[in-house]
Amino acid sequence: MRIIDRYVIREVLPPLVIGLLVFTFMLIIPFLIDYAESFISKGVPALVVLRVMATLLPSALALTIPMALLLGLLVAFGRLSADREFVAMQACGVSRLRLLRPVGVLSVLGWGATTYILLVAVPDANQRFREITFGVVAARAEGEVRPRTFFEDFPDLVLYVRDVPASGAGWTDVFMADNRPGQPAATYLARQGRVVIDRDERTLEMVLEDGSRHTADASGAYEVFRFDELLLRLNPETVFPREGPPLGAREMSIAQLRVRAAELEREGFYPHSELFEIQKKFSIPFACLVFGLIGLALGVSNRRDGKLASFVIGVGVIFAYYVLLWLGQSLVRGHVVPPWLAAWAPNIVLGGLGALLFAWRDRAADRPMRFGRLPSIPTFRIPPLKLPMLGILDRYVVSTYSRIAGLSALAMAGIFYISTFLDLSDKVFRGQATWSMLGTYFWYATPQYAYYILPLAVLLAALVTIGLLTKNSELVVMKACGISLYRVALPLVGAAILAGGALMLLEETVLGPSNRRAEAIRHVIRGGSPQTFDVLLRQWIVGSDDEIYHFDYYDPRARQLNGLSIYEFGSRMQILARRTDATRAVYIGGPDTGSNQWRLEEGWTRELAEDGETRAFMSFSESQVAIESSAYFTTQQPDERFMSYGQLRDYTARLRASGFDVSGQLVALERKISFPFVAIVMTLIAVPFAVTTGRRGAMYGVGVGIVLAITYWVAISIFAALGSGGLVGPALAAWAPNLLFGAGAGYLLLTVRT
């Protein structure tokens, strides 16, 4: 390789690596939060957590290597064009065609790496991920039960516990409804409970201590059985099937996919997904070659377009590629095109366009791309915004900062949408969901994406803005004019305060309801039952006085509950004080009556003593009872993940007054206040970092920002897990990352030359 080849490769590698870090980090953030924090809080060894995180990397890299290659080429050639180095190359006889050699080397390396990952690493890593998490869940099945939340993952069983110890082992105050086939329906109440799993013997047992078993028929005949310890054998296939975790198409190798396709053909089904997945394992790596051609055609120019526009162009090309890829899968499902054509269509279309664009730009490198003659549109000049204490310098810094923050946010949002689309679209093509459901999920998931993106966009914008001012010696000129670094960074801090306010506003308004709705839609898309989330089909609900209601269906228009059962408890949950069953219940209360009266029809009420003996029994054709209002049965049940600060504060106070361990709720409460401050902390630490590293370029600053962000997110997960486990105080667990990074920012700000 010649000097020019090595020079071009050295220019491409830094933004390529940075892009790989950015895209991969954005893809694994949700998994980091969902798995790492949960595992750490349950006492899973750190080595196992690291292994789980490592198994996530191949799936992410299979998507991010082609993306990062395109971004690296666009940014590198954008820099060469902006600094007029390509003009110098042309003057020395180096044409665009000559640059195909270093670009081809990088593209072939990317193709080889992605091919290996998709053919070898991804099936192996995905299966190991399923086995590791499967083993963790099997070993700590009782830890998957959340306190004061109905757990329905055991078939034909509904489990509700009031408290779960910090260790995650065992439960306190257990309520369980048993509707397993072949035996009468029963209700179990116990002081303590746990799950015992033997992986070698493949047995699954539930142990209940100090409790009672209640059975009743439609006529009201009742039986109570008291026990000190009761062992219930459950179906072991619910935890570990005979063949282990079932393989999905992404976990299968090519040989396994071909075997599965042959089986489906023998059964009379067309194996569109399997055939498409086989072709996709070869077509996606080939995208590296296509993106290499497009990156060279779009990036190299005699015009001073700069690097920032390359971000938007790259994301647009990536969007186009994956939209074409998954549109092709939809056509395969409809038997419109064969699987090979659908998988290779994005490469054919974009490759052809890239070749045409390359040939056209090679003959007209100085001319910008134009798409026909567009009619002229009158323009209106908007006067510059003048705010108190916002001078020319502030507007200049803010304009650069805003442009970089906006482009960063758009790029990262694109990665989130692409990754989610890739994750869930297969359910649409398999008929488990509709495009409308997927679009609705995107709508409700957008606030959560913004919650993740905003702090990182603020960090990157501060790093790149100060880095550009330092590299271009503009910061030196400002200092020479008597303007300190603190004064230059003042508008950036102001923007960070606004970003923190936006995070807090999101937290207090739309984030919780949107997350709840998005989680419900995702649950259904993945094949779950809607009853866990749908207020009309929820079936189980806890009252304001800790009584439990079960109903078959709620009609909000008629304000009628069908198949209602009410369980009221005594001084302890293992003591059932009263049970009421009714065929239907109609709400007759309201503002006019000033009560929450319901008319119960065709049922019975039984009052029980502490020893389980019946104290009173009454059957009725019609009866009135005061319970919750009708609106209560359409109100979502408390969950700290979906609550605002005020709601969680009140909920935590009620739990604490009832004597429950509220360590997890207190950590979540403190985090709702501490997290918005991350925008300010990251800006304060970014300014001195950018001054120190600014001479090395903006992309180096982006790399530093990603490392800082990864470190911060890991610190959040670790301290939150420690706080939930009671090892550190809730306030310290929530604020420790901000305190640590804030102390580092203070030290750097006091020692950097201002």
Image: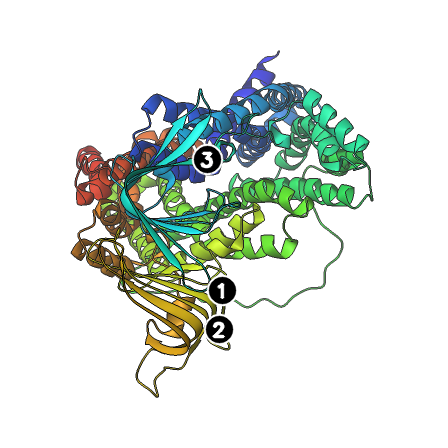
Measure how far apart labels 1 and 3 are at the Cα level: 34 Å
The label number, if any, that marks residue 556 in the structure image: 2
Q: Amino acid at mark 2?
A: Pro
Q: Secondary structure at mark 1?
A: loop
- The disc, 2 or 1, on the residue closer to the chain's N-terminal end is 1
Can see residue 576?
yes
Measure how far apart labels 3 and 2 are at the Cα level: 40 Å
Label 1: few (<14), some or many (≥20) within 10 Å? Answer: some
Q: Which residue is mark 3?
A: 28
Q: At 23% across and 39% down in the image, what residue appears?
A: 723
Q: Colour scheme of this structure image?
A: rainbow
- What residue occupies the far bottom of the structure in this picture? 592
Q: Which residue is mark 1?
A: 536
Relative depth, front residue between 403 and 230: 230
Q: Position of residue 639 (x, y in %)?
A: 35, 54
The reply to whether callout 1 and callout 3 are in contact (CB within 8 Å) is no
Q: Is residue 679 left or right of residue 85?
A: left
